[in-house]
Amino acid sequence: MSSTEQSAFEAAIVDTCTKHKEAHWQEDDYRACVSIGTEYFVKFDNPRALWPEIATHKYISEYAQAHADTPRMPRISKVKYHFGDKRTMYMVMEYITLTNPPPDLPERTAEAVRWLSGVPAPPGHVFGPLGGGLIRHRFFKNHKAPLAFSSIEALERYIAKARTLLSNLRKEPLESVSLSGERLIFMQADMHPSNFGVDEHGNTVLMDFAQIAMLPESFAAYVLPSNGSLARSLGLSSSSNTASMAVISSCLWMVSDSKLGLDEDGYPKASIRKR
């Protein structure tokens, strides 16, 4: 594709996405994504929100391509490229034709999640979504962390602060949440069936990387409360963490300041004195 053709193609994508947003943004089930024929699928959002998803999707997709001989590995769409226009970033992926969900989709979903949990982190990455940014997980208010935590310890301090605030309102003490020493794994925090599917060739498809990140296993177990067998097959340790996290999460959803007065390191944010 020449530079002229590339520019024209990108302009067409921007135009299609703009028209889609103008026509549907008020709908309850609005999603910032469109199909370009049967060749491309495009997601768009502000760069800060979309970049972590692009980085995570691209890395895991390329890992899957490099290990294509792995039995029953899920199919992941290839990220063709991405580009920015003004305040919007666009991720262009290959289009995958999906079939009606088969009866064994739950089993296929479990296999896909198990495979995902075994994907190693890229060199230098320790925690959270690739490309930085906020963790997206239903533990947090509005399914999004209020801070880009700098480390596991920072996240642990944040949870401890929420526990302290909550303990002042409870008669029974709430057990602490310890994440130190936990295994870190890639996990799909949104287990909705729409994030899994089957293509026309019978391959399981793993979709929507916005809520996939490298997280402590307690955060993985937290989204699997109704599927004990899957949690066990992932080797998730049984602890009181998830029970305490459920109580703490309900508190986080009610507070007005979800940052709890902390910074990204999990310490009290320095106040600015007025002169």
Image (cartoon, rainbow, N blue to C red):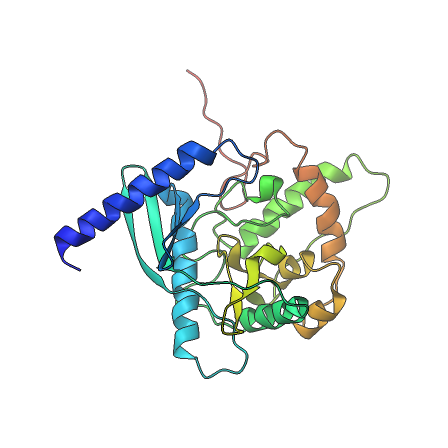
The picture places residue 187, in percent across and down from the top left corner, at: 57, 62
The picture places residue 97, in percent across and down from the top left corner, at: 46, 63
On screen, 126 above or below 153?
below
The picture places residue 70, in percent across and down from the top left corner, at: 49, 82
In this rendered view, identify the residue nearer to me: 75 or 130. Answer: 75
| Residue 189 in sight here | no
The picture places residue 15, in percent across and down from the top left corner, at: 30, 40
Residue at 72%, 72% in the rendered image: 232
* Picture mark count: 0
In this rendered view, identify the residue nearer to me: 183 or 62. Answer: 62
On screen, 47 above or below 82?
above
The quarter of the image holding the C terminus is top left
The quarter of the image holding the N terminus is bottom left
State which quadrant residue 182 falls in. Answer: bottom right
> In the shown orientation, is residue 57 left or right of residue 188?
left
Q: Residue furthest right?
A: 171
> In the shown orientation, is residue 153 left or right of residue 103?
left
| Residue 116 in sight here | yes
